[in-house]
Image (cartoon, grey):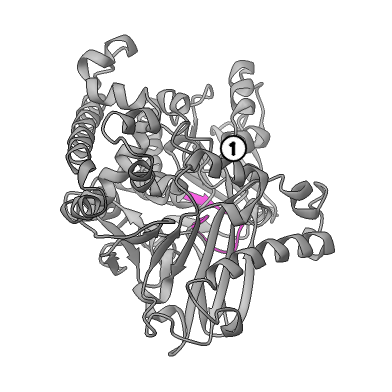
């Protein structure tokens, strides 16, 4: 006989959105069971080990965690601020362009000083830009407070009530930025973080980019000691301490909406979880595939099926037998920008020309020496990458046992070599220092995190998608969504999506109880 659990809510997927929704539901007094197919929680927020080295899967920097930062209240609810040490990154990052290099301090005033040093003629415009970004943030906060109070402003009234927010989220970053910054070089500098969001300035939501800059430069950039995986395990610990259940290595096989209690979730190990409601941290498309029972609304199904996944990544994880920070290369986050034409660079990403795209070199040993033995380093070389590169990374689209497919092995090795050769230009002798190399591709992301096309950020974060963001509710009254596809890409937005989904589910549970 299979094991059967009962709870108010069953959460499908122990990514940060799912874990956050579980903790927020517990704070509202509801019981939870979280079901996850992987052996580790966290989704992209986890790590793997080799011979005393610890490799970070995806996290570069958390945003908004400082006092007053927008994300801090969520982390307080997760109950991990006292369980995990969060280190502020200052400087935040260094970026190298063909003609100059800038080290970006962790505070806005210092960042503006650096902009003025390199582009004195653009300093006035940069100050005006960040003043406008502050106004956008103020509008966004007012909008959030109004919604929490039950004030649903009709879309045609948005420009009057929240003019700066409406203008930003109705514009591309290139159009928004062009109001303040004139030179291509300065615009490229202020767009360095476009890779964190997965689209070039012409397609990227200005509101999203503006809030990214605001969050990092007011609430700080942070990295947890022990890596993002430690953070995920500590959230699990907090859930379990309060009576919640987290079931790992249990791939969900079905979400049955015809169960008398409301929902029945079945897993690959024969476990059943019966609940009044379900929150899915899987993509809407994957959630749709799991649903059994009454027919799903056709229009919603078509909408879900039409969503374009955001770009994925290739990451070359390196264990080195030398401490490159001690040698003087002490950047936690280093952007190697190949040109000022970010639109051409995006096309190079789509075409898989990895020698012509921005590369991030992360030295995790700088901020967290525990990730490597004494005298060693852990580096990650990261580029955005398309799913269909070289006929789906040499597999022809057949992902069956792809990891032992020689075509796949050859293609990813050749692509990885391009990044290593580039990194050797500023870390001489890098290749001879490598003890271990692991290469993650979009197929790796799809396998472990179950994201369509290995997406890093859910759906593409275009102007239109941000203006018409998918909420946590679905046409099924007891099915709710969390994660990047509704909250936006990034770990702190994923956590916030869990809060939003929990709030919607709690309202439903209140109506059921009544």
The residue stretch that appears in magenta? 33-44
In the image, is 166 to the left or to the right of 232? left
Q: Note whether 462 is above or below 46 in the view shown.
A: above
Q: Residue at the location (32% across, 68% down)? A: 84
Q: Which picture quadrant has residue 415?
A: bottom right
Q: Note whether 365 is above or below 79 in the view shown.
A: below
In the image, is 182 to the left or to the right of 429? left
Residue 426 covered by magenta stretch: no
Total numbered labels placed on residues in the image:
1
Q: Nearer the viewer, residue 51 or 9?
A: 51
In the image, is 332 to the left or to the right of 85? right
Answer whether residue 324 is visible to the viewer in this image.
yes
Image x and y of residue 328, in percent? 36, 80
Viewport quadrant of the N terminus:
bottom right
Q: Among all residues in the image, which is located at the extreme bottom?
A: 374
Residue 38 covered by magenta stretch: yes
Secondary structure predominantly adopted by residues drawn in magenta: loop
Viewport quadrant of the C terminus:
top left
Image x and y of residue 280, in percent? 53, 40
Image x and y of residue 423, in percent? 53, 69
Residue that badge 1 annotates: 309
Q: Note whether 53 is above or below 113 in the view shown.
A: below
Mark 1 surroundings: few (<14), some (14-19) or many (≥20) residues within 10 A = many
Answer whether residue 56 is visible to the viewer in this image.
no
Q: Which picture quadrant has residue 36?
A: bottom right
Per the image, label 1 sits on a secondary structure element best described as: loop
Image x and y of residue 18, in percent? 46, 47
Q: Which picture quadrant has residue 28?
A: top left
Q: Residue at the location (44% across, 85% down)? A: 323
Q: Nearer the viewer, residue 416 or 218?
A: 416
């Amino acid at each position: 006989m299979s094991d059967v659990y009962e709870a108010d809510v069953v959460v499908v997927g122990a990514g940060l959105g799912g874990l956050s929704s579980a903790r927020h539901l517990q704070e509202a007094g509801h019981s939870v069971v979280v079901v996850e197919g992987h052996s580790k929680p966290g989704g992209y927020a986890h790590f793997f080990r080799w011979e005393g080295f610890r490799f970070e899967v995806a996290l570069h920097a958390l945003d908004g965690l400082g006092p007053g930062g927008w994300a801090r209240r969520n982390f307080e609810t997760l109950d991990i601020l006292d369980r995990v040490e969060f280190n502020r990154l200052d400087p935040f990052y260094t970026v190298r362009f063909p003609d100059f290099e800038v080290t970006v301090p962790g505070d806005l005033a210092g960042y503006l000083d650096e902009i003025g040093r390199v582009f004195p003629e653009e300093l006035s415009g940069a100050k005006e830009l960040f003043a406008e970004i502050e106004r956008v943030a103020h509008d966004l906060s007012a909008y959030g407070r109004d919604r929490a109070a039950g004030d649903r402003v009709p879309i045609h009234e948005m420009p009057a009530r929240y003019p700066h927010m409406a203008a930003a989220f109705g514009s591309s970053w290139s159009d928004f930025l062009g109001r303040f910054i004139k030179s291509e070089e300065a615009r490229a500098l202020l767009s360095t973080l476009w890779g964190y969001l997965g689209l070039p300035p012409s397609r990227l939501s200005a509101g999203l980019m503006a809030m990214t800059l605001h969050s990092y430069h007011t609430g700080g950039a942070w990295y947890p000691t022990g890596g993002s995986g430690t953070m995920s395990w500590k959230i699990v610990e907090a859930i379990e301490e309060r009576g919640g259940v987290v079931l790992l290595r249990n791939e969900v096989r079905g979400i049955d909406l015809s169960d008398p209690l409301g929902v029945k979730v079945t897993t690959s190990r024969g476990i059943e979880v019966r609940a009044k409601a379900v929150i899915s941290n899987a993509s809407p498309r994957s959630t749709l595939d799991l649903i059994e029972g009454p027919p799903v609304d056709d229009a919603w199904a078509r909408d879900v099926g039409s969503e374009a996944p955001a770009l994925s990544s290739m990451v070359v994880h390196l264990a080195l037998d030398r401490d490159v920070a001690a040698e003087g290369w002490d950047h936690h986050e280093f952007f190697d920008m190949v040109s000022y034409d970010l639109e051409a660079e995006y096309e190079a990403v789509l075409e898989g020309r990895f020698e012509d795209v921005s590369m991030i070199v992360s030295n995790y040993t700088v901020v967290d020496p525990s990730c490597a033995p004494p005298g060693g380093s852990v580096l990650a070389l990261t580029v955005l990458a398309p799913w269909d590169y070289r006929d789906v990374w040499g597999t022809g689209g057949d992902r069956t046992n792809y990891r032992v497919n020689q075509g796949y092995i050859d293609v990813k090795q050749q692509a990885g070599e391009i990044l290593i050769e580039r990194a050797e230009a500023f870390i001489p002798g890098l290749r001879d220092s490598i003890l271990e190399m692991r290469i993650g591709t979009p197929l790796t992301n799809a396998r472990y995190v179950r994201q369509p096309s290995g997406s890093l950020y859910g759906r593409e974060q275009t102007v239109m998608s941000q203006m018409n963001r998918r909420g946590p509710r679905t046409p099924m009254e007891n099915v709710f969504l969390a994660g990047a596809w509704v909250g936006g890409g990034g770990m702190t937005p994923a956590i916030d999506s869990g809060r939003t989904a929990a709030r919607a589910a709690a309202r439903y549970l209140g109506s059921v109880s009544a």
